[in-house]
Image (cartoon, rainbow, N blue to C red):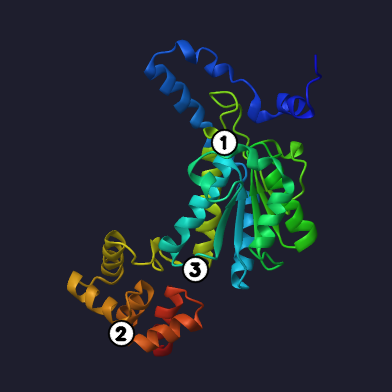
Amino acid sequence: MPAPSPLFDELQTLATEQRNPASAHIDTASTEEILRVINTEDHRVPIAVRRELPHIAAAVEHVVDAFRNDGRLFYVGAGTSGRLGVVDASECPPTFGTDPERVQGLIAGGREAVFRSQEGAEDIPEEGAKALEERGVTAHDVVCGIASSGRTPYVVGAVEHARDAIGCPTLFVTTIPRTDLEVEPDVAICPVVGPEVIMGSTRMKSGTAQKLVLNMITTAAMVRLGKVYENMMVDLQRTSEKLVERGLRTVMMVTGVDYDAADAVLDRCDGHVKTAIVMILADVGVEEARRRLDDTDGFVRPAIEAELRSEN
């Protein structure tokens, strides 16, 4: 009889591969009981993420520094983790008006793996490093590995290559204890959510935790970069009817003008919500509003308040 492989022995000890006693009898439970078990376990996720806030904050600082120096953020993952990175990256341009190159998601197996599982693609660490080289990653960028188990070769290979060969800041999002993480990134984010309801199905609690963390990283970074005024998206791209109307509504809510007035001002500034807000609240033209936003690195509040300071 062949001896167990090293991977078999490793899986036995991984936090993400343990059995959850709370769901041991889920196969005989009613539908509502199944859902109750899942929901109860899901409640553990935000608590685990909250414990990692200092580390998430450190990650955000790396990302903000990179963006301010024309750097980029690269998510690297496989399976569910990779898809979550692709999703977060794809949502930044319409939400925050960023260049699609600014945040990118790399997934083992390439584009096809987003839609259909390509599990074997994750087993080659050199492929992770190769993916970074193909995207031209430099020391000005940030590479964030995402792997529930903390051991996915494609992800570990990419993070180690980014750290050792490229010299850029590295992050790692995983749901195993920090002490069990073998790779050494600059920042490790480790919300330990406990065993999954279905053993090893890390698309569940682990995936939810990773989604929350990625949301936090990009959202907080964009807030720090002036992409938000108060708590509203003001750099959104009007690429759909919904986003057109959201832009109009935002201008109306911030400035108090009616629909037609908001529409007229947005037409004058090519639909740019930030510029429209500054034009109305500071009572200036398009070019002056743009100049103020340039002077304040895109932050709306000081661009508006510049008029108030000049009057005092």
| Label 1 element class | helix
Residue 69 pos. (x, y %):
63, 73
Q: Which residue is at the front of the view, 190 or 157?
A: 157
Mark yes or no: residue 212 visible.
no
Check disc 3 and give the amino acid type: Asp
Residue 232 pos. (x, y %):
38, 62
Q: Which residue is at the front of the view, 160 or 39?
A: 160
Q: Is residue 276 rendered to the left or right of residue 260?
A: right
Which quadrant of the view contains residue 181? Answer: top right
Question: Where residue 99 is drawn, which disc sits there?
Answer: 3
Residue at 63% x, 35% y: name it: 192
Check disc 1 and give the amino acid type: Ser
| Label 3 element class | loop
Residue at 42% x, 74% y: name it: 300
Which comes before the other along the chain, label 1 or label 2? Answer: 1
- Residue 278 lies, with reference to residue 187, above or below; the image says below
